[in-house]
């Protein structure tokens, strides 16, 4: 009987495994099912540009069904994984119907979530930058702050509304701060009562330099570039607490702000953390070098959920899209080898480097051979490389057009309140419809597979 391979997660890692399996499996050898809570995969390197309106949200996501041919895609929120009975519980995100999937081989690729480090107020008063929805919410929030500031009579309230704080000086934080500067420059003329000098962007990093995981030169360049463009960069200080009016730093410093963006860290999916498997102190699954989960035959882990040893004592591969994309095909090969009774191979990969776009046509890049490039050339390399990595020709063309249009026109300041319950309720009541109108529930043809 054909073996059942179930992949959990439709991000970089999960899709890469499914593509690898599609290439290698013979007809009838195994069934492949990919379960994910969204029907698209998100190209995170371009997410900060969505938050500033530089790119259209739909242009950086690719429907999973369009990426895969022979894999069965199931839209589902994984709620529990039982490694003993080898079954997965899922809830359909639209119909809320529950179902169970059984597996012979399981791939854990559920990625990561934002971590608050239990800092008081982070969960309640800050905005994360991890999902497409986060980026859209941030964009709308920034525009809403400008609209409110334009009519605020109280000077303290206005100051708080025009103060934007990004916490975390890693890739996401640095890119988000750079994008905010570009956004405000681009739309300034639409808000004649708000002079540019009144808008304050602060970037807070706990380490001694920006981009602390990279070369000091890259951090120093990023700091100089952002400071020159008006960003107040605070290094070596950490957030003690966030409240509705702003944040307090451990040094005692206080920053008033109605918009605090939290990009200070990630941790593996809570579903993965709940598994009875060996984990790092951050909750990532400790795997063997071939990415199999130790002590659980036929279970594999990769991407942000996994801690994969490099073979050098104590070292593991970093949780990046670059690595997840390379790990996927190797797990696929190892699963196929296991099904055919052959030996598995360890994952081996030398990083191609790292890059960050700072906005204003500037960037930093660490290339193979530890070559550091900064400025316009690094930004060009960033754009060319990531455009080439974006899945699907149609997406590449759409993003290239967005960038071209960005050269000609200001960014869009339409505030799309699509995520608020208030907007929906008002729209349906204006139309004389019931707010209780729900989507029809389609009964699935099977509640468990295969
Ligand atoms: C803003 C930002 C910028 C980044 N920039 C870069 C960059 O420039 N270069 C780089 O190499 N890396 C970058 N990264 C890191 C990169 O995005 C991650 O390392 C990569 O996404 C990891 O891939 P993954 O497949 O493990 O996880 P993900 O891509 O996060 O995929 C996880 C998938 O699992 C699904 N999922 C999660 N929980 C459940 C559940 N309970 N049930 C069902 N489905 C679920 C999610 O919907 C998602 O589809 C960036 C990350 C962010 C947030």
Image: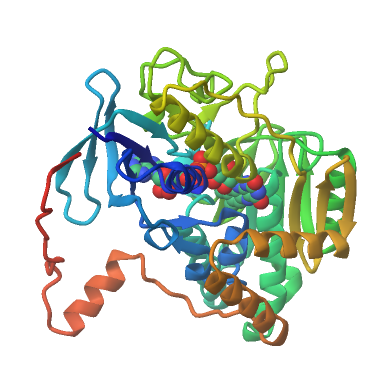
Where residue 191 sits, quadrant-wise, is bottom right
Report the quarter where the N terminus lies.
top left
Instruction: Please state the total of marks drawn on the protein image.
Output: 0
Question: Residue at (60%, 76%) from the top-left corner?
Answer: 397
Q: Is residue 223 above or below residue 235?
A: below
In this rendered view, identify the residue nearer to me: 93 or 250.
93
Where residue 4 sits, quadrant-wise, is top left
In this rendered view, identify the residue nearer to me: 5 or 261.
5
Q: Relative to residue 408, is residue 431 drawn left or right?
A: left
- Residue 250 image point, x, y percent: 67, 32
Question: Residue at (61%, 67%) from the top-left corner?
Answer: 155
- Residue 200 image point, x, y percent: 71, 61
- Residue 297 image point, x, y percent: 38, 18
Q: Relative to residue 217, is residue 75 drawn left or right?
A: left
Report the quarter where the C terminus lies.
top left
In this rendered view, identify the residue nearer to me: 175 or 356.
356
Q: Is residue 114 visible?
A: yes
Question: Residue at (56%, 66%) from the top-left corner?
Answer: 50
Colour approach in the figure: rainbow
- Residue 39 image point, x, y percent: 36, 57
Question: Residue at (65%, 83%) from the top-left corner?
Answer: 405
In this rendered view, identify the residue nearer to me: 250 or 373.
373
Q: Is residue 166 visible?
A: no
């Amino acid at each position: 009987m054909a073996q059942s391979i179930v992949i959990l997660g439709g991000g970089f890692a999960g899709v890469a495994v499914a593509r690898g399996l599609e290439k290698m499996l013979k007809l009838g050898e195994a069934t492949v099912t990919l379960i994910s809570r969204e029907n698209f995969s998100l190209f995170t390197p371009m997410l900060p540009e969505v938050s500033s309106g530089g790119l259209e949200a739909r242009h950086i996501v690719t429907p999973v069904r369009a990426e895969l041919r022979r894999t069965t895609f199931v839209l589902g929120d994984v709620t529990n994984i039982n490694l003993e009975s080898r079954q997965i519980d899922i809830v359909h995100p639209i119909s809320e119907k529950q179902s169970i999937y059984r597996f012979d081989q399981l791939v854990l690729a559920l990625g990561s979530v934002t971590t608050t480090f239990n800092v008081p107020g982070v969960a309640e008063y800050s905005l994360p930058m991890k999902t497409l929805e986060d980026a859209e919410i941030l964009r709308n929030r920034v525009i809403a702050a400008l609209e409110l500031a334009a009519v605020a009579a109280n000077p303290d309230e206005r100051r708080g509304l025009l103060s934007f704080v990004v916490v975390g000086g890693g890739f996401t934080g640095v890119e988000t701060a750079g994008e905010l500067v570009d956004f405000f420059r681009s739309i300034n003329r639409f808000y004649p009562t708000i002079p540019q000098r009144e808008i304050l962007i602060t970037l807070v990093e706990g380490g001694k330099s920006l981009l602390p995981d990279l070369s000091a030169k890259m951090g120093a360049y990023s700091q100089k570039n952002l400071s020159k463009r008006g960003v107040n960069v605070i290094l070596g200080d950490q957030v003690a607490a966030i409240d509705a009016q702003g944040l307090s730093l451990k040094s005692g410093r206080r920053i008033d702000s109605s918009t605090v963006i939290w990009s200070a860290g990630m941790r593996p999916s809570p579903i993965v953390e709940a598994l009875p498997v060996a984990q790092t102190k951050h909750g990532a699954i400790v795997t063997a070098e071939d990415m199999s989960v130790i002590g659980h035959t036929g279970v594999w882990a990769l991407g942000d959920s996994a801690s994969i040893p490099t073979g050098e004592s104590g070292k593991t591969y970093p949780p990046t899209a670059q690595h997840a994309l390379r790990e996927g095909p190797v797990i696929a090969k190892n699963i196929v080898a296991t099904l055919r009774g052959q030996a598995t191979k360890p994952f081996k990969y030398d990083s191609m480097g790292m890059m960050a776009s700072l906005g204003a046509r500037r960037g930093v890049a660490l290339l193979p051979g530890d070559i550091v490039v900064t400025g316009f050339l690094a930004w060009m390399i960033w754009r060319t490389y990531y455009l080439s990595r974006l899945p699907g020709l149609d997406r590449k063309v759409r993003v290239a057009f967005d960038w071209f249009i960005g050269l000609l026109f200001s960014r869009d300041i339409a505030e799309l309140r699509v995520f608020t319950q208030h907007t929906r309720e008002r729209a349906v009541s204006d139309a004389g419809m019931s707010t209780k109108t729900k989507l029809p529930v389609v009964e699935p043809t099977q509640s468990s597979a295969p």
